[in-house]
């Protein structure tokens, strides 16, 4: 029998028996290398993205010298993350505005009216959707419980105050509706006010999808900045358009230079650029923040991009950032501190770290968490990652590696994953005695039953530019390579829908608990 035939037979047997194959350990950990792709280059310039990883539909509020940002969080809870900056480039997390699951959240709008902060957002559960609001008197919270304001046929609410002093929400498809004075309910029925701007039929776009209206007031004009072209699909689809009116009630006239910005070629570094918030800098310069996919990395989700704009003599604005592939002059303003947040976690508690969110949690999900011992004990749920509501974190690097120690109690199964959705994930799970591979969102070769004794295991997941390699260890020092590798460049919205991203994740299934210790993440060169 040929040598390669023998090796193939050994690898197949290892896979079927769930026995890892020995391999040399990867290079040692480099301290301090985290999920912090730094936009600020330190020489008066910055390079996009300003927030790497899955940061879609950014909404920015200017509040004096401070900027606050929130984003779509979809099925991740806690949701509606809030970030703080004073220069639009360096951002620090402040927390989240919502913990109770009201459905997949997308396209929020964060505003301040009087002394109170509001976030308006749509959410969908199955085929049911509505619009909600949360409010707080301090940006750091506490935030109110979500209030359902209805408007089930619309998405992407954008808040505005008219010349009459009344409050309005602009909605997808060119509609708007008056709000009650307290902003917590509607005071009428939606009316259509804007037909949008039509791009040439020859352009490659996903769909028309007029959405994400954001309203600015400047020099006697209301500006409505909107997204059209669909948020995924062809790289050249998504775009930013604007229109203006002297009255909040219209008529709205399209800018002569629409689209304001758009990816024109798949060769550009950022794809599907759109869904912008227009915001003034502290020095009088103006900017757009919007999202886009990194060329070749749909898997990272839509990342937050910052582009300078300039106002013309006739009162329109033009984009000045090009394809965003080169450094740009940085906005003024002081840094609020180290940008981003570390993903590594020793689970010292007493609460869940800001980097973690449950996928589609139930009402009592947080009762699964126990920090009373060494590390995080997570009560099992469901039988596989798809029904276990894994804990996920947002990675912003093209190549990275993470590892974790698991103490698996009898009756439990625990694992480490790259998780896109309940239908698509990859990684390893263990009952403490045997290991199973999660591949394509399935358990291969078969579902792993909990054991009566449990055990301790270390897992390592490496995602090196879509090549996934898995390792196990019984002591955290000597590592064994799993005999199957994956290529996961197709784990994204254009394949599986849902507008999500591929994220590092941990899960606990079954009836027992899994205690996680020493989660370590590092970016790779």
Image (cartoon, rainbow, N blue to C red):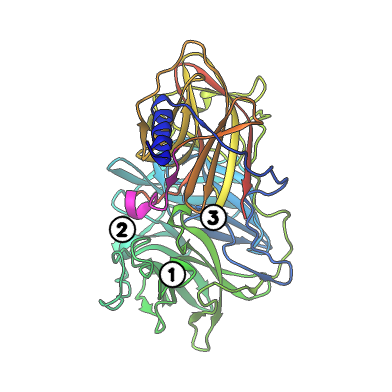
Residue 489 on the magenta span: yes
Q: Which residue lies furthest to the top in this view?
A: 452
Location of mark 2 (residue)? 190
Crowd band around label 2 with a 10 angstrom C-alpha radius: few (<14), some (14–19), many (20+): some
Of residues 20 and 142, the one drawn nearer to the viewer in this rendering: 20
Location of mark 3 (residue)? 398
Mark 2 lies on a secondary structure that is: loop
Crowd band around label 1 with a 10 angstrom C-alpha radius: few (<14), some (14–19), many (20+): many
The residue drawn where x is 51% and y is 58% is 303
Q: Which residue lies furthest to the bottom in this view?
A: 313
Q: What stretch is highlighted in magenta?
A: 484-496
Location of mark 1 (residue)? 225
Give coordinates of residue 57: x percent, y percent.
46, 57
Q: Which of marks 1 and 3 is nearer the N terminus?
A: 1
Judge from the rendering whether residue 174 lies leftward or rightward of residue 139; answer left or right.
left
Q: Earlier in the sequence, mark 2 or mark 1?
A: 2
């Amino acid at each position: 029998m040929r040598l390669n035939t023998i090796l193939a037979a050994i690898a197949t047997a290892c896979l079927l028996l769930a026995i890892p194959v020995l391999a040399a350990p990867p290079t040692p950990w480099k301290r301090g290398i985290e999920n912090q792709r730094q936009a600020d280059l330190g020489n008066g310039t910055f390079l996009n993205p300003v927030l790497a990883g899955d940061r879609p539909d950014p909404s920015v509020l200017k509040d004096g010298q401070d900027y606050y940002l929130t984003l779509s969080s979809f099925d991740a809870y806690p949701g509606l993350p809030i970030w703080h900056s004073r220069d639009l480039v360096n951002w620090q997390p402040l927390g989240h505005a919502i913990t109770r699951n009201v459905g997949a959240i997308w396209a929020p709008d964060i505003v301040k009216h009087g002394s109170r902060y509001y976030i308006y957002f749509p959410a969908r559960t199955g085929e049911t959707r509505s619009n909600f609001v949360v409010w707080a008197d301090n940006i750091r919270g506490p935030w109110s419980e979500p209030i359902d304001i209805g408007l089930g046929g619309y998405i992407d609410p954008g808040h505005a105050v008219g010349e009459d002093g009344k409050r309005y929400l602009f909605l997808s498809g060119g509609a708007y509706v008056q709000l009650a004075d307290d902003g917590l309910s509607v005071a009428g029925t939606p009316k259509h006010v804007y037909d949008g701007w039509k791009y040439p039929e020859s352009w490659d776009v996903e769909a028309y999808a007029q959405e994400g209206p954001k309203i600015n007031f400047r020099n006697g004009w209301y500006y409505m900045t909107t997204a059209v072209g669909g948020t995924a699909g062809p790289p050249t689809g998504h775009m930013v358009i604007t229109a203006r009116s002297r009255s909040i009630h219209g008529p709205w006239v399209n800018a002569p230079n629409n689209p304001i910005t758009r990816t024109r070629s798949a060769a550009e570094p950022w794809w599907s650029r759109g869904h912008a918030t227009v915001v003034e800098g502290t020095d009088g310069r103006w900017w757009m923040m919007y999202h886009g996919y990194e060329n070749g990395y749909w898997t990272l989700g839509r990342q937050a991009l910052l582009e300078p704009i300039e106002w013309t003599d006739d009162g329109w604005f033009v984009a000045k950032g090009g394809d965003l592939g080169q450094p740009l002059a940085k906005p003024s303003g002081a840094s609020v501190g180290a940008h981003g947040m570390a993903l590594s976690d020793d689970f010292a508690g007493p609460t869940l770290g800001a980097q973690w969110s449950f996928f589609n949690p139930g009402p009592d999900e947080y009762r699964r968490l126990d920090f009373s011992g060494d590390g995080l004990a997570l009560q099992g749920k469901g039988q596989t990652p798809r029904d276990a509501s894994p804990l996920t974190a947002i990675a912003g690097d093209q190549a990275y590696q993470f590892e974790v120690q698991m103490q698996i109690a009898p009756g439990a199964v625990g694992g480490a994953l790259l998780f896109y959705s309940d239908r698509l994930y990859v990684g390893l799970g263990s009952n403490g005695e045997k290991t199973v591979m999660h591949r394509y969102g399935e358990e291969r070769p078969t579902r792993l039953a909990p054991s009566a004794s449990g055990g301790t295991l270390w897992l390592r997941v490496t995602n090196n530019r879509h090549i996934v390699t898995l390792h196990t260890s019984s002591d955290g020092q000597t590592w064994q390579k799993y005999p199957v590798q994956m290529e996961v460049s197709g784990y994204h919205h254009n394949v599986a829908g849902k507008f999500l991203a591929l994220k590092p994740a941990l899960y606990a299934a079954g009836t027992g608990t899994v205690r996680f210790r020493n989660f370590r993440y590092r970016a790779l060169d």
